[in-house]
Image (cartoon, rainbow, N blue to C red):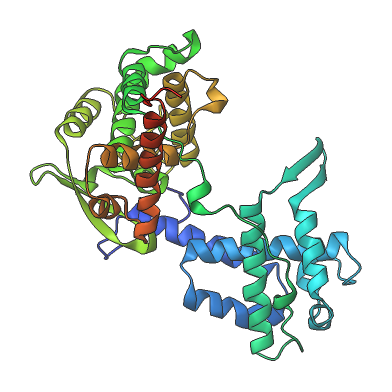
Amino acid sequence: MGTDIRIHNKSDKPDNIIYKEIVTEEQCSALEEQMPSFLRGFFRYLRGNLLPLSRLGYLRDITFFLHYLVNETDLTDAALPRDIKLKDFSGIKAVDINIFLDYARKYKVEKENGTYIYQNDNKSLARKRSSLSVLFKFLYRDELVPKNITDGFDPIRLPKAGDKEIKALHDDEVMVMLDAAANGTGLSKKELQYWNKTKLRDRAVLLIFVTYGLRLSELHQLNLSSFNFSRDEFKIFRKRGKETSMPISESVRRALDEYIASERPMPAMDEDGAQADADALFLSLQGRRMTERQIREMVKKYTSIALGTERTAGYSPHKLRATTATSLIERGNSIFDVQELLNHDNITTTQLYAQHRNNAKRELIKDMEWDEE
């Protein structure tokens, strides 16, 4: 937690959750300051209708579009995004947005240390299209631009949810992954040097992921105070700030007890002598709360061992969430119970994992034809 922010928290939320909300709000404000003043009403609209992280996503997409207008087009004479005039926006047509989306598919940026190539898939392009649709509909509604140009935006084809391949570990691969964390199996000599200091932590992280199907952000925010071992439960904060209690399994309890008692390092001291991450559950070797990136890289490492692939081909934490879903459904659990555990907004999301198992059964049956042709 940063040393320049002091939190006087009287709510039920832990300090690290409040801190993340504050940082997100500051990031939103910083982006808004880069934009034209005629968008202030739009900023108020986003604040009233979106959660901070969703609002940040919209603002990033629109900031990217404004930089594109300044640097890549003659649609404005402005030198900076904040200098763009309302009359410039009034002259933008649907075809200009379609050209922008085509540009965003693959573009390059010149930097001091080289040329960087950026590429967006259809899902990312669809999100940018959606952000601009919301913006231009708002401007038209408030009579800031003369036409609603959004009907002319080109559609972006996305694969149907059922068409996507479900990537998840099988149960035997989960056991290989956990064995690698417990015994160092499959790790390089260099990796073993760190593993000796983090093996209990790593195994506990992986166990929580595959037991509860947590999102990366949900695991990252866990604190010591999140756990009430006397009641066999712990608290997590879901999307939209929803607080949820989870039962503690025996295997997770044993893993956490061992990690906390034998391996968890002392939290690092700040310049003023405070231990900012004293309550954080999973700490780095430097005594700081593990970052989401550190957790992601750790998961990729152990899943790559389970899959027998290169480290870069390992699975993300979200694939462990899929692992939990498919494993539970394969064991005969109700998809409605799995939906509740994983906090899926819609049952159709959970049904995708059930469909994955149905497809697997179909493939098995194909190999069991007994009639001779």
**Residue 149 spot, x, y in % from top left:** 74, 79
**Residue 59 spot, x, y in % from top left:** 62, 65
- The one nearer the camera, 85 or 162, is 162
Q: Is residue 169 visible?
A: no
| Residue 363, above or below 126 | above
**Residue 88 spot, x, y in % from top left:** 84, 78
Horizontal relation, residue 84 to residue 205: left or right: right
- The one nearer the camera, 362 or 336, is 362
Q: Quadrant of residue 55?
A: bottom right
Farthest top residue in view: 189
| Residue 185, above or below 177 | above
Q: Residue at x 80, y 55 (%)?
A: 103
| Residue 118, above or below 204 | below
Q: Residue at x 34, y 56 (%)?
A: 238
Q: Residue at x 45, y 22 (%)?
A: 307
**Residue 69 spot, x, y in % from top left:** 82, 65
Q: Quadrant of residue 262?
A: top left
Q: Is residue 44 visible?
A: yes
